[in-house]
Amino acid sequence: MRRIIYYSIFVILVSIVVGYLIILVQPLSTQDEKEKNGLGGEQEDVVELTFWRNYGNAAENKAYNEILEDFHQSHPNIHVNMQNIEYANYEVELRTELVTGTGPDIMAIDSPYVALYAEADLLMPLNEFLTEKDGLEEDFSETIMEGLTYKDQLFLMPLIESSIALYYNMNLLEDANLPYPDSDPASPMTWEEVVGLLKQGQRPEEGIYGIDPAQGFGSGEAPAYFKLPIIWQFGGEAVSPDVTTASGYLDSAETMEALQFYQDLYHKDKVAVRELPAEAFENGQLMMTVLGGWAITDLEEKGLKLGEDFGIAPLPKSKYQVVPNGSWALGILSSTNHPEEAWEFIRYVTSYESMKKYSSITGEVPARYSVAEDIPAFNTYPYNIFAEQAYSYSRNRPVTPAYPDISKAIKKLFEDIGLANKDVEASVEEAVETINKRLREAD
């Protein structure tokens, strides 16, 4: 009888222990299974985003990496996978991904292409996310923001702005007993004055050339970016304000005057040549060239010293002082599953603090007035030239889904009159027909 009692007690104790272990282990097993399936722990709160940008220079990449690290520290529940893609392949790869429906949540877009992506319903309007703290009205240039807006909707947020200026070889000007151009952003030389200096100083027979007025005859978006300002400076236009026609604008008297001036640089005044030696400016063979602010670091890395070997002045003007604007800006994929988190990242990157870090590292003009005001470099020579021009004298390229074709037509037009020395009027007529055809298709 006693053995039966002891056995019964033993069974009861074992049952209690086993039951306790089951209660104890089951939650752990369940938690392990949840974590194994990505359902438990902190992982369930982390939103994964993809961000594509064009691979920049060393300074730009360093700035983005630091900002991304800062973002992850302050936003532990959002993880952004940044992919850097070579500039030459960026547009093709991005559009391929977007067409297949597997594009990134966040993407960098070259601003003149904003309408193309927006019209295709690939970009999410940002207006609904904006609040007063974003400082859209008081901290950004109205002109710059108009270039990121399509059909009254803002689709991209800017981090930096671009501008171009006149770079000159100090030694070549000194050798010819010629004065340096004025560095005051509000007092550019006229193109006539530039041509006069170049005629006095150039010695093409000795391999000393005058000027590369608009980045030669390259590919991509650079031709339109560097050359459209010449048209604007003479009072001309490429297309109508409503971007419906080139007739009466690209073939106007003002535009024709600008194009004839450009052709004369190569074929009448002969202060520009169609083929320059490689790195002519860096090697002391070119008196003047037109470059962006990004070129300062590049030139210094090649051994040239600002203030000793080269100087910088505002872009020359004609009737009007005009420079191009527009740069890479950030947008959200319209079909993203995480619009709020994507906007949080864009808001962070384009905030005062991040923008200040980016511009301090890269030397690029910040899109916010307040950042430029608080970085001493942008209030003194030479970076003040780029900032003041961007904020006060810049123009947008036409905002239209047809812009890529307008850009190609402008590129061909300047090649025809400059490189091939074709008749200006006939070349313009062909460009007008090409652009109008594309605008009718886009209507």
Image: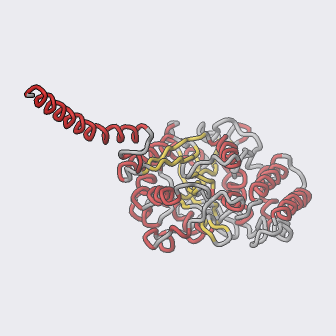
**Which residue is painted at 35% across and 41% down in the image?**
31
Q: How many marks?
A: 0
Q: Position of residue 206 (x, y in %)?
A: 70, 37
Residue, x 47% and y 51% (percent of image)? Answer: 363
Q: Position of residue 265 (x, y in %)?
A: 76, 53
Residue sitting at 54 percent across and 48 percent down?
A: 294
Residue 202 seen from this side: no
Q: In the shown orientation, is residue 149 left or right of residue 250?
A: left
Front in this rendered view, residue 275 or 33? 33
Q: Is residue 200 left or right of residue 79?
A: right
- Nearest the viewer among 175 and 266 is 266
Residue at far top of view: 3
Residue 95 percent coordinates (x, y): 69, 47
Tell me how the rendering is colored. secondary structure
Answer with left or right where residue 141 lies relative to residue 202. Answer: left
Which one is in front, 3 or 201?
A: 3
The answer to whether any part of residue 272 appears in the image is yes
Name above or below for residue 88 compared with residue 392.
Answer: above
Say if 64 sits above or below 236 in the image.
above
Where residue 392 sits, quadrant-wise, is bottom right
Q: Residue at the location (68% across, 51% down)? A: 198
Which residue is at the front of the view, 171 or 2? 2
Quarter of the C terminus within the rendering:
bottom right
Question: Residue lying farthest left?
Answer: 2
The residue furthest front is 1
Image location (x, y in percent) of residue 378: 45, 59
Quadrant in which the N terminus is drawn: top left
